[in-house]
Amino acid sequence: MAIDEPTEDFAAMFEASVKAKRIEKGQTIDGTIVAIGPEVAFVDVGGKGEAAIALEELKDAEGHVEVAVGDRIQAVVVSTAGGLTLSRKLALGAASLRQLEDAFQSGLPVEGKVERAVKGGYEVRIARQRAFCPLSQIDTIRSDAAAHEGRVYQFRIVEYKEGGRNLIVSRRALLEEEQRAQAAEIRRSIVAGAVLTGRVTSVREFGAFVDLGGGVQGLLHVSEMGWARVSDTSQVVKAGDQITVKVLQVDESREKISLGLKQLTADPWSNVGTTYQVGQVRTGRVTRIAQFGAFVELEPGVEALAHISTFGPAGRAGKSSMELTPGMTGAFEIASIDLEKKRIGVALVPEDSARAGNAEDTEHQDAPAERFGSLADKLRGALERREK
């Protein structure tokens, strides 16, 4: 009686076999030496089959074969026509001029060491040759020139002249290819609420762009950088920084990703209900002035409004030479608290009252940077001048 073969298992094995054979030129693979002949050696690369590598690739500077059967090596696939052909020297950065020319013609990556920064780019050592990598081709983002010195990277030869004595290489071309291959998969992992690690690509006044991988970028807006007001984005992040962010929103139709940094730390407003009370006096710092009053920072991330109506009579407001500027500190009484809307109303405490010790929260009574005896007058005077 004939026994039916498990067709599903055979189909799965066939599919796995097909996938195993999908090897592309330029791919770096590991394998085990299984045989060494007079001119070539054979390498077992697992389910991918066997590959051939020229014996010259396995010799040291004195011409001695430096591997034995059973040794594992890493090599670059230089050809898939009629079987796999490997090059170990391309992987080791010890390629000959002929191999470098072949790499240029086929677009294969080569290994090089960035020796030093020079005018307009970098001097790169590839095997025994010197190559030039333009500044714009060393990375996908701008960074400090010295950051790449001494690093070993994969490069693509984009110009091969004078028999290999004049080489122009690009690392960026390889990075961008890798990014395009990763982009689709990475986009699937970017969903609202996800916490991801990315690299800052550029910093602007309104925020910073962060590469989340594969060239997929999101915007970290200045308002999402910290609970406290951020006046200078470059003081929070810099190009090249590796940071962890939270995905706030993904607009697939517009291909826009909104990121947050402050969401990874505790919201200072979460403690306002227990640490602040109406009637309490706190030291505050004026952060900005509006027509209707002044905004006062009570602690980083907690800002209150001192309405102009709370400043009382103009008094000495006629002294127009006295300017009110952000940064002045003084005592403010908590007049109202709206936790739902995250609003606190405060009133300026006269200097005499503050000196008398009416402030309840003494731990917040820092020495004022400028005395507030005439602060109300200064504020009112400043507001009146802005209205004229």
Image: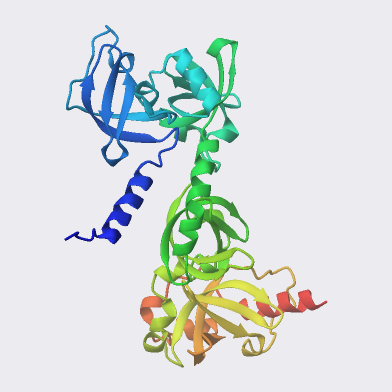
Quadrant housing residue 140: top right
Query: Is any part of residue 374 visible from this angle?
Result: no
Decide if residue 280 is on the left or right side of residue 287: left
Q: Nearer the viewer, residue 78 or 224?
A: 78
**How is the protein colored in the picture?**
rainbow
Indicate the position of residue 350 as horizontal and vertical percent values: 55, 84
Q: Nearer the viewer, residue 154 or 353?
A: 154
Indicate the position of residue 198 as horizontal and vertical percent values: 45, 55
**Position above or below: 249 against 86:** below
Decide if residue 302 is on the left or right side of residue 21: right
Indicate the position of residue 36 as horizontal and vertical percent values: 23, 18
**Position above or below: 210 against 299:** above
Count all numbered tags in the image, as a single digit.
0
Outermost residue on the front side: it is 1
Q: Nearer the viewer, residue 173 or 229?
A: 173
Decide if residue 235 is on the left or right side of residue 309: left
**Position above or below: 66 against 20:** above
Quadrant housing residue 219: bottom right
At a point 42% along the width and 76% down the height, the residue shown is: 267
Outermost residue on the top side: it is 62
Q: Which of 350 and 101 is in front in this view?
A: 101
**Position above or below: 192 against 57:** below
| Picture quarter with the N terminus | bottom left
At a point 37% along the width and 47% down the height, the residue shown is: 19
Query: Is any part of residue 343 visible from this angle?
Result: yes
